[in-house]
Image (cartoon, rainbow, N blue to C red):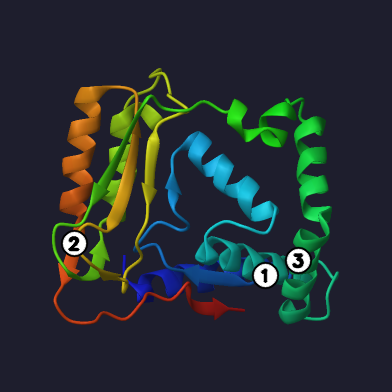
């Protein structure tokens, strides 16, 4: 879909909310590359844990803060989205966000040991770093291919009833617009099956497009609809 299609859909959703007396906003965000670095169940949980402790990928953290700021403003907990974003950042820095996350896990019957000690989360046996063989700039990423590659590793279901391997996935190390040099790490595949591993390395490699000239980075958000 185009940005125009997304805007039309967002405007319709906002309009429906307003018709029933609700304050509604919509954020049209970018989906032309993975948000954050991790693609896969346990890998994404580890990334979320890092973010709640103040670490994690910058784009992932900023995206979460912007959305949290909007939600706090909509909920009347902040004067506007800017104050909401500041409050969300303070909650992370103070540890309150982490405390609330743990409370939510406990309330749903989860085992806190897995987030307090992330090394307990399942880990893949085959870790394959893939490096660049050329210089240039990362120009585009086929996000649909990255997602299906994770499914191909067993990280998602191809059909109803398939077992899910929580350990497998992909970690991306470059963003669109980043300069790339030969030997630089592009992505890492986490697999438990050698044949699937090799297939995914090829698939992701083919999903990345490079340019010899500089490429503008992608925005996190394209438009706010209210």
- What residue is pinned by disc 2? 182
Above or below — where is 161 with respect to 95? above
x 77%, y 62%: residue: 93
Tell me: residue 221, above or below residue 107: below
Question: How many numbered circles does the render carry?
Answer: 3
Query: 1 or 167: nearer the eye?
Result: 167
The quarter holding residue 133 reads bottom left
Q: Residue at point 32% right, 71% down?
A: 178
Dot 3 or dot 1, earlier in sequence = 1
Sooner in the amino-acid sequence: mark 1 or mark 2: 1
Q: Judge depth for marks 3 and 1 and give the one in front.
A: 3
Residue underneath mark 3: 88
Residue 149, percent across and down? 28, 39
Residue at 69 percent across and 65 percent down: it is 68
For disc 2, the neighbor class at 10 Å (few under 14, some 14 to 19, many from 20) is few
Q: Nearer the viewer, mark 1 or mark 2?
A: 2
State which mark lies toward you, 3 or 2: 2
Marks 1 and 2: CB-CB under 8 Å? no
Dot 3: what SS?
helix
Residue 173 found in image quarter: bottom left
Q: Say which quadrant the N terminus sits in.
A: bottom left
According to the picture, the residue beneath numbered tag 1 turns out to be 24
Report the disc number at residue 50. Answer: none
**Alpha carbon separation for disc pair 1 and 2:** 47 Å
Mark pair 3, 1: CA separation:
19 Å
- Residue 157 seen in the current view: no
How packed is label 1: few (under 14 Cα within 10 Å), some, or many (20 or more)? some
Q: Considering only order in the chain, which callout, 2 or 3, is on the residue closer to the N terminus?
A: 3
| Farthest front residue in view | 183
């Amino acid at each position: 879909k185009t940005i125009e299609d997304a805007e039309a859909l967002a405007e319709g959703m906002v309009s429906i909310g307003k018709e029933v007396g609700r304050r509604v906003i919509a954020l049209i965000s970018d989906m032309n590359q993975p948000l954050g670095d991790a693609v896969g169940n346990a890998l994404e949980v580890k990334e979320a844990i890092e973010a709640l402790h103040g670490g994690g990928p910058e784009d992932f953290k900023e995206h979460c803060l912007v959305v949290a700021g909007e939600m706090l403003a909509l909920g009347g907990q902040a004067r506007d989205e800017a104050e909401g974003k500041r409050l969300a950042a303070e909650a992370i820095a103070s540890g309150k966000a982490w405390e609330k996350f743990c409370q939510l896990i406990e309330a749903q019957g989860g085992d806190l040991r897995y987030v307090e000690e992330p090394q307990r989360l399942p880990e893949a046996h085959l870790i394959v770093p893939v490096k660049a063989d050329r210089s240039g700039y990362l120009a585009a990423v086929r996000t649909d291919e990255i997602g299906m590659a994770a499914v191909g590793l067993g990280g998602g279901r191809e059909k109803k009833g398939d077992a899910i391997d929580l350990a497998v996935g992909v970690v991306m190390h470059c963003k669109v617009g980043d300069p790339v040099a030969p030997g630089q790490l592009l992505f890492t595949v986490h697999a438990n099956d050698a044949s699937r591993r090799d297939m995914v390395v090829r698939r992701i490699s083919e999903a990345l497009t490079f340019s010899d000239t500089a490429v503008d980075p992608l925005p996190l958000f394209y438009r706010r609809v209210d």
